[in-house]
Image (tube, coloured by chain):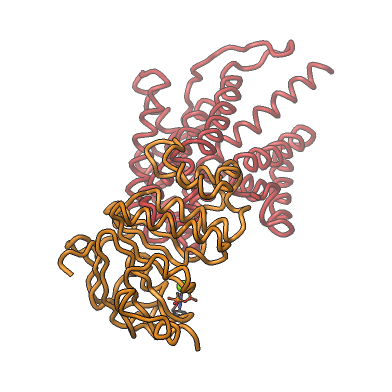
C-alpha cells in the first residue's frame, strides 16, 4: 500500500513537472507578447524530431539540444520578422497566422519524416529506487531538470537586466522606447525564446512518447489549459496551472482511465474560462 | 538657429486624421530651457510626442545639432541623445524605484543619483518599493530624476511639476538650473507660471496647435503670458 502511494506521488510530481515544462514556451509568448501561439505544439514536435535525427545518426542524445535551438530558433526568428512583428495587438490575426504556421510545420514534418511513429531510445536506461520503489532514471532526470529550468527562469526573469527590460516593455512600451529600448528587438528575442523553450521540451519528451508529425495537437491543447487555469504573467501561476491540470488528469486517470482524465481536464478548463478567465494566480 | 542643439521647423502632426499641431517651429541651444505654455488641449503634449518620436510627423523637420532625425524611431532618437518624461504613465509601475532609476545604466550603482537623493530623500527611502505604489507627485519626481540623471544633450519634460508639492518644485528648479549650467538643453511643458519663470530662458506659447507668442523671458511680460493661459 505504501509503495503504491509512493509510486502515485512520484508519478504525480512527474506529470506536473513535465506539463509545466511543456507549457513554458507558450506562457512566455502569450504572457509577454499577448500572442497565443497555436504552433506551440509543432515546435515541441520539431524538438522531438531533432532527438530522432540525432539518434538516427548515432550522435549523443545531448547534441539534440543545440540542434533544436538552432532549428526552432531560426524558424521562430524568421516567422517573427516576416509575420508576427506586424500582428502584435491584433489578437485574431495572430491566431490565424499561428494556426497557418502550425499546419505548415506539420505538413513539412510529414513530407520529410513520413507519418510513421518513431521512438527515441532513452539516454538513461535503468531504474533508481525512490522510497523503496524502482522508478525509471530518465523520468527522475526529467523531474530534476524540469524543476531546475523553471526555477532558473523565474529567478532570471525577476532579477536579470534583460528580465527587467522585458517587464518594462510589457508594462509601459511607450516609456520603454523613449528610454532607448528597442521594443522590436526585445519582442523578437522573446518570441524566439518561446519557440526554443518549446523545442527543448520536445527534445526532453522524445524518449518518453511516440514521435510523429501530429503529436503537437495534443500538447497545444493541454498547455493552453495550463495557462487558462494558472493565469498569465508569473511562473507561480504556471506551476499552479500545471498542478491543477496535471494533477487532475493523473488522479482521474489513475482511478478510471485516460479518457476520463482528459475529459475532466477539459471540463476544468471550460469552467475556468467561464467563471474565472484570469486564472488562479492573477499578477498583483 | 544654426547653433541650436535641437530645432524643429514647421512641424505638423496629430492622431488618426485629426490634425493637432499645425506648423510649429522653435529651437533650443546648449544651456538653455525652452518653456512651452498654453491652455489645456492646445497640443503641448502632442508637440513633445512628435519631438520624441511617439507620433510620426506629418510634415516638417527636426534637427539634432543640425542632423535631421524626424525619420528615426523613438528608441533611436533616445540613443541619439534625447531624454523624455511623459505627462502620464511616467514610470514603470511593476518595477521597484531602484530598477526604474537603473534600468538603462551601465551598472546598478546608485552613486550618480546622490544629487537627486539629497533633494528628494523620499526616493532613497523608497528604493525597494514598487514604483506603482507611489503617489502621482512622487512618480513625477522619480521620472524627473531618472531623466535628468541620464545626462543627455536634450531633455523633454511634459508637465514635470503636476501634482508635486511647491517645496519639491523648487528642488526641481534648482536641479534644472544645475543641468543648464552643465550645458543641457531642455524643452519643458508647464502650466505653473511661477515655476516656469524660475527656469525658462525662452517661451513658446501655443494656442490651437499654433505658436501665438514667443520670445525670451525678458521680452515677454507676465500679463501677456497670462492672457494666453487663462480663458
Ligand atoms: N491619443 C489621442 N488620440 C486622439 N486625440 C488625442 C489624443 N491625445 C490627445 N488628443 C487630442 O489632441 C488635442 C491636444 O492634446 P494634447 O495632449 O497635446 O494637449 P495638451 O496641450 O498637452 O493639454 P494638457 O494641458 O491637458 O496636457 C486635444 O484636443 C486632445 O483631445
Ligand atoms: Mg499635455
Quadrant in the rendering for residue B198: bottom left
Q: Which chain is orange?
A: B
**Where residue B123 sits: x, y (%)?**
55, 47
Q: Residue A111, percent across and down? A: 35, 43
Viewer-nearest residue: A112 or A185: A185
Relative placement, left or right, of A171 versus B62 is right
Horizontal side, residue A138 vs residue A237: left or right: left
At x 37%, y 49%, the residue is B150
Chain in red on the image: A
Rendered location of residue B5, percent (x, y): 23, 61
Name the quarter where the N terminus of chain A is drawn: top right
Q: In this picture, is A137 found above or below B81?
A: above
Q: Is residue B40 visible?
A: yes
Q: Residue at x 53, y 30 (%)?
A: A152
Q: Nearer the viewer, residue B122 or A184?
A: B122
> Which of the two residues, A74 or A165, is positioned nearer the viewer here?
A165
Residue at 33% over, 41% down: A74
Amino acid at each position: 500500500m505504501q509503495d503504491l502511494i509512493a509510486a502515485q506521488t512520484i508519478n504525480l510530481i512527474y506529470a506536473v513537472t513535465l506539463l509545466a515544462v511543456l507549457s513554458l514556451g507558450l506562457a512566455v509568448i502569450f504572457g509577454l507578447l499577448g500572442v497565443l501561439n497555436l504552433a506551440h505544439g509543432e515546435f515541441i514536435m520539431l524538438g522531438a524530431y531533432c532527438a530522432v535525427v540525432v539518434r538516427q545518426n548515432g550522435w549523443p542524445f545531448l547534441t539534440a539540444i543545440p540542434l533544436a535551438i538552432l532549428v526552432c530558433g531560426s524558424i521562430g526568428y524568421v516567422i517573427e520578422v516576416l509575420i508576427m512583428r506586424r500582428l502584435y495587438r491584433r489578437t485574431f490575426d495572430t491566431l490565424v497566422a499561428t494556426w497557418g504556421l502550425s499546419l505548415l510545420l506539420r505538413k513539412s514534418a510529414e513530407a520529410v519524416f513520413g507519418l510513421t511513429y518513431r521512438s527515441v531510445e532513452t539516454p538513461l536506461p535503468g531504474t533508481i529506487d525512490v522510497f523503496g520503489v524502482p522508478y525509471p532514471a530518465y523520468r527522475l532526470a526529467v523531474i530534476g531538470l524540469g524543476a531546475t529550468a523553471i526555477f532558473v527562469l523565474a529567478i532570471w526573469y525577476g532579477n536579470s537586466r534583460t528580465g527587467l527590460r522585458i517587464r518594462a516593455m510589457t508594462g509601459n512600451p511607450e516609456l520603454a522606447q523613449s528610454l532607448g529600448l528597442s521594443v522590436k528587438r526585445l519582442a523578437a528575442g522573446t518570441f524566439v525564446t518561446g519557440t526554443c523553450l518549446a523545442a527543448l521540451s520536445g527534445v526532453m519528451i522524445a524518449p518518453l512518447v511516440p514521435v510523429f508529425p501530429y503529436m503537437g495537437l495534443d500538447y497545444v491543447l493541454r498547455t493552453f489549459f495550463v495557462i487558462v487555469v494558472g493565469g498569465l504573467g508569473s511562473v507561480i501561476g504556471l506551476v499552479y496551472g500545471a498542478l491543477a491540470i496535471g494533477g487532475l488528469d493523473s488522479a482521474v486517470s489513475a482511478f478510471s482511465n485516460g479518457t476520463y482524465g482528459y475529459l475532466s481536464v477539459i471540463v476544468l478548463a471550460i469552467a475556468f474560462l467561464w467563471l474565472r478567465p484570469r486564472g488562479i494566480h492573477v499578477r498583483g | 538657429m544654426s547653433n541650436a542643439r535641437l530645432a524643429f521647423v514647421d512641424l505638423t502632426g496629430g492622431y488618426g486624421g485629426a490634425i493637432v499641431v499645425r506648423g510649429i517651429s522653435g529651437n533650443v541651444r546648449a544651456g538653455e530651457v525652452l518653456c512651452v505654455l498654453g491652455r489645456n488641449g492646445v497640443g503641448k503634449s502632442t508637440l513633445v510626442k512628435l519631438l520624441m518620436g511617439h507620433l510620426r510627423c506629418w510634415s516638417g523637420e527636426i534637427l539634432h545639432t543640425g542632423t535631421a532625425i524626424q525619420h528615426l524611431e523613438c528608441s533611436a532618437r533616445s540613443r541619439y541623445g534625447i531624454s523624455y518624461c511623459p505627462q502620464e504613465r511616467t514610470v514603470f509601475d511593476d518595477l521597484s524605484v531602484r530598477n526604474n532609476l537603473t534600468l538603462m545604466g551601465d551598472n546598478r550603482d546608485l552613486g550618480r543619483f546622490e544629487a537627486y537623493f539629497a533633494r528628494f530623500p523620499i526616493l532613497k527611502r523608497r528604493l525597494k518599493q514598487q514604483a506603482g505604489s507611489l503617489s502621482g507627485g512622487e512618480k513625477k519626481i522619480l521620472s524627473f530624476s531618472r531623466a535628468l540623471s541620464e545626462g543627455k544633450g536634450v531633455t523633454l519634460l511634459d508637465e514635470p511639476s503636476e501634482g508635486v508639492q511647491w517645496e519639491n518644485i523648487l528642488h526641481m528648479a534648482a536641479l534644472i538650473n544645475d543641468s543648464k549650467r552643465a550645458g543641457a538643453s531642455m524643452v519643458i511643458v508647464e502650466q505653473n507660471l511661477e515655476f516656469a519663470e524660475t527656469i525658462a530662458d525662452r517661451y513658446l506659447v501655443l494656442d490651437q496647435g499654433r505658436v501665438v507668442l514667443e520670445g525670451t523671458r525678458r521680452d515677454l511680460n507676465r500679463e501677456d503670458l497670462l492672457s494666453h493661459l487663462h480663458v
